[in-house]
């Protein structure tokens, strides 16, 4: 990939002053010979954070110190479910940990993560990295300043489909991605999950990240349209991206669909690849001497979130062993890159709507329930 960051965000190793850390296969041995467990904690144990706590608890490479959630009821329920200690203060939890997952609403990522980085803790923060580019850039700088492993939860990068696609990334000419979901259910006293930000930052950012990994070129231009339907931010969005090398990508994301759909299709010079995450099925058609050869792909091979957490632990253990910060598969810099394009798309949608005088009715569903 071309380096899309200023020099200060280049992904070079840093000498580690105090922390030192590995495991890729989610139940595998540590590849650098460091078999000690990493003391981890989870901040935010709602719909997604609960699974962070559950999978860390199952990992042979982690000891779960405890969990924290703004809702004591949620924290106590998850703590009882998995036999985990519940902390009343996230910083008290952090003091006893070497690494933490942050799975709070995106608008709280910056304020929840910066203090952890300042304490010298390794952090995995869920996507999007932050609610703004400025906040995300500050988080990346802080992680580099304190020489810690900083990962972003773009879980689709650990999907078996992406494992396959990365091997075939060369010569990608056109990508078509559809990510459709039903409107999230109410959460008493809080936003419906993800609706604190646009669907661009909530769902489409997954495909933005994948497209940026598949196309080895900088973005030349893009066109985007989108509207709010049930929330105060865009609920359905379509974008077409043109890259400087001539490649194109069409992406559609919706959180107001009746039928969920997650499809990613890649067209190359002599190959067509189709991945249906919902049906756990993939297919490759490749031109050969006698016509087209078809290969079917089973996408049920691994738990992507478990693989993501183990990759994070692996980076920490390799850092311990080498004394130099080792990058996880999705480092903060790549999370910043995806967010930068996502925010630009979001801004273009709002500019477009303002330019044409499009006004939308107030949402019929309360943004904060309860």
Image (tube, helix red, strand yellow):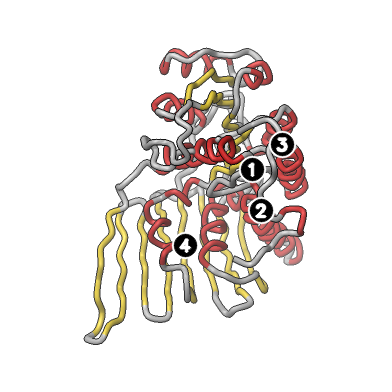
Considering the numbered disc 4 on the image, is that residue within a helix, a strand or a loop? strand
Residue drawn at point x = 73 percent, y = 66 percent? 356
Position of 155 relative to 221 (above/below): above
Would residue 194 be visible to someone looking at this image? no
Residue at numbered disc 1: 324
Give the x, y percent position of residue 200.
Answer: 60, 53
Q: CA distance from mark 3 to mark 2?
A: 21 Å
Considering the numbered disc 3 on the image, is that residue within a helix, a strand or a loop? helix
Q: CA distance from mark 4 to mark 3?
A: 29 Å
Label 3: few (<14), some (14–19) or many (≥20) C-alpha neighbours in 10 Å: many
User: Marks 1 and 3: CB-CB under 8 Å?
Assistant: no
Disc nearest the viewer among 1 and 4: 1
Which of 1/154 is in front?
A: 1
User: Marks 4 and 2: CB-CB under 8 Å?
Assistant: no
Which of 150/320 is in front?
A: 320
Position of 124 relative to 343 (above/below): above
The mark nearer the N terminus, 3 or 2, is 2
Residue at numbered disc 3: 110
Disc nearest the viewer among 4 and 2: 2
Q: CA distance from mark 1 to mark 2?
A: 12 Å
Residue at numbered disc 4: 177
- Mark carried by residue 11: 2
Label 2: few (<14), some (14–19) or many (≥20) C-alpha neighbours in 10 Å: some
Residue drawn at point x = 36 percent, y = 60 percent? 275
The mark nearer the N terminus, 4 or 2, is 2
Give the x, y percent position of residue 139.
Answer: 72, 41
The mark nearer the N terminus, 1 or 4, is 4
Quadrant where the N terminus lies? Answer: bottom right
The mark nearer the N terminus, 4 or 3, is 3
Would residue 179 be visible to someone looking at this image? yes
């Amino acid at each position: 990939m071309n380096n899309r960051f200023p020099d200060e965000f280049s992904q070079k190793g840093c000498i580690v002053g105090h922390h030192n850390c590995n495991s890729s296969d989610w139940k595998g041995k540590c590849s650098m010979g460091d078999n000690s467990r990493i003391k981890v904690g989870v901040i935010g144990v709602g719909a997604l954070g609960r699974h962070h706590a559950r999978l860390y608890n199952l990992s042979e490479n982690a000891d779960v110190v405890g969990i924290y959630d703004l809702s004591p009821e949620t924290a106590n329920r998850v703590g009882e479910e998995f036999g985990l200690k519940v902390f009343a203060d996230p910083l008290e939890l952090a003091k006893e940990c070497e690494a933490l997952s942050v799975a709070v609403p995106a608008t709280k990522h910056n304020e929840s993560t910066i203090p952890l980085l300042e304490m010298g803790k390794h952090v995995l923060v869920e996507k999007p990295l932050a609610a703004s580019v400025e906040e995300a850039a500050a988080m990346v700088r802080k992680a580099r300043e304190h020489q810690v492993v900083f990962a972003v939860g773009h879980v689709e990068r650990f999907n078996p489909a992406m494992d396959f696609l990365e091997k075939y990334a060369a010569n990608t000419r056109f990508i078509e991605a559809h990510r459709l979901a039903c409107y999230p259910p109410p959460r008493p006293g809080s936003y419906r999950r993800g609706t604190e930000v646009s669907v661009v930052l909530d769902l489409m950012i997954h495909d933005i990240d994948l497209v940026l990994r598949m196309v080895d070129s900088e973005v030349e231009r893009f066109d985007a349209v989108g509207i709010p339907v049930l929330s105060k931010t865009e609920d359905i969005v379509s974008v077409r991206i043109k890259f400087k090398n001539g490649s194109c990508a069409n992406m559609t994301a919706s959180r107001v669909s009746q039928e969920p759909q997650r499809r990613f299709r890649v067209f190359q010079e002599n190959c067509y690849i189709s991945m249906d995450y919902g049906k756990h099925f993939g297919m490759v058609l490749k031109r050969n001497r006698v016509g087209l050869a078809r290969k079917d792909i089973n996408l049920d091979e691994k738990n992507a979130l478990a693989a993501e957490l183990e990759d994070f632990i692996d980076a920490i253990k390799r850092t311990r062993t080498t004394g130099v910060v080792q990058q996880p598969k999705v480092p903060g810099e790549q999370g910043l890159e995806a967010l930068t394009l996502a925010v630009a798309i979001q801004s273009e949608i709002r500019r477009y709507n303002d330019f044409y005088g499009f006004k939308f009715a107030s949402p019929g569903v309360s943004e904060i329930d309860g």
